[in-house]
Amino acid sequence: MTNNINMTIESASKLVIDCFVRNGCSPAVAKSVARVIVAAEADGCLSHGLFRVPGYVASLRSGKVSGVAQPKVRQALPGVIVVDGQGGFAPPALDEARSSLIELTRGNGIAGLALVNVHHFSALWTDLEPICAEGLCSLAFTSYLPVVAPAGGTKPLFGTNPMAFGWPRADGRPMVFDQASSVLARGEVMIAARDSHRMPEGVGIDANGNPSTDPNEILKGAMLTFGGYKGSAIALMVELLAGSLIGEQFSYQAGENDNKDGGPPRGGELIIAMNPVAIGGVGAFAHAEQLFSKITEQPGARLPADRRYANRVRATESGLSLPAEVVEQVRALMI
Ligand code: NDP
């Protein structure tokens, strides 16, 4: 049985920031990355919470990722911002470019942000919520390492390739769905391996291409896309949007060039933001609320992100319940 330690959000943030600073990050980079990690933990997205800190630190220690990178932002086209993360983590690069994306989207109705030369290891909803807070809806896409087989194939080629979509709401809790194009995020398989749990059927195959429910065998083999060929098509789209469209590498190329330190590979992220009031008129948000009501009035149905918001309220009131093993791992990385 796992022992858990209760910690406030502030204490967990301080722990993660200190750990990153001790491993070579500037305070600004440490704070930016810690924000997305602790937010994931608070929202109950454990596969992107403190569990990820050893991977981030491994990539700093191996020299693959720079903890002091100074991202460079430029407006490449009237509606396109490009930020070169200079080999750093994605969150500080996005922090540097977010206000430019918001300004362009307000003026043009639609704008894109290409993040290149970054290392992305977090949930995408943390990237979109601040854009939604400005009254803009948005889409985000990023690729990863080759760990997912294309539909019908047996060899890893695609990343787990998440996509997310956020729509602002008046209560400050936007509707955001954020989903891997694999059946599950890879972190879930890693957690199952750590805790010696079986996976449900359909999550992955072993190295010989046979269906498996053993997380260790799936980690050696390949994960599967959700919905068969439909998820495979989305994984393909994400490769193109976060790869060739913005001049970054595909997941399989990231795999070829990665030093396999367990941290995030180099890659890209595409964010597209849109201004519903400018495009659809002042009634756009009220119109969307009608649809949301039609969903939530059905017993058993809910909006994506509502589970997270309920967890966030609990974490804010009662703190985080962190596996002792994970906290110990983070502390050990500070020596
Ligand atoms: P899930 O399958 O757990 O959830 C996908 C989405 O569906 C969430 O927005 C979730 O909302 C929503 N949802 C789940 N159940 C319901 C329901 N009953 N009704 C309505 N909506 C529902 O996520 P994944 O395992 O696919 O992905 C997990 C995370 O991993 C994502 O945040 C993704 O960005 C991240 N990831 C990051 C990668 C990277 O390289 N950076 C790679 C791959 C994944 P809710 O959260 O409220 O349950």
Image (tube, rainbow, N blue to C red):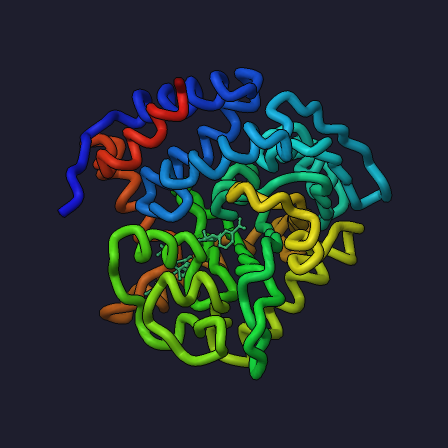
Return the x and y of residue 306 as percentages of the image width and height.
Answer: 33, 52
Q: Nearer the viewer, residue 155 or 68?
A: 155
Question: Residue 280 placed where, x, y %?
Answer: 63, 57
- Count of numbered circles in the view: 0
In the picture as drawn, the residue positioned furthest to the bottom comes out as 152
Question: In this image, 316 relative to 183: left or right?
Answer: left
**In which quarter of the view is residue 320 placed?**
top left
- The residue positioned 76% from the left and 31% from the top of the image is 73
Quadrant assignment for the C terminus: top left
Residue 101's spot in the image, x, y percent? Answer: 69, 38
Residue 155 horizontal side relative to residue 36, left or right: right
* Residue projecting furthest to the right: 77
Does residue 139 appear anywhere in the picture?
no
Examine the rendered structure and indicate whether residue 1 appears above or below residue 217.
above
Q: Is residue 262 visible?
A: yes
Examine the rendered structure and indicate whether residue 141 appears above or below residue 64.
below
Q: Residue at x 54, y 57 (%)?
A: 162
Looking at the rendering, the quadrant in which ligand 1 lies is: bottom left
In this picture, residue 20 sits left or right of residue 117: left
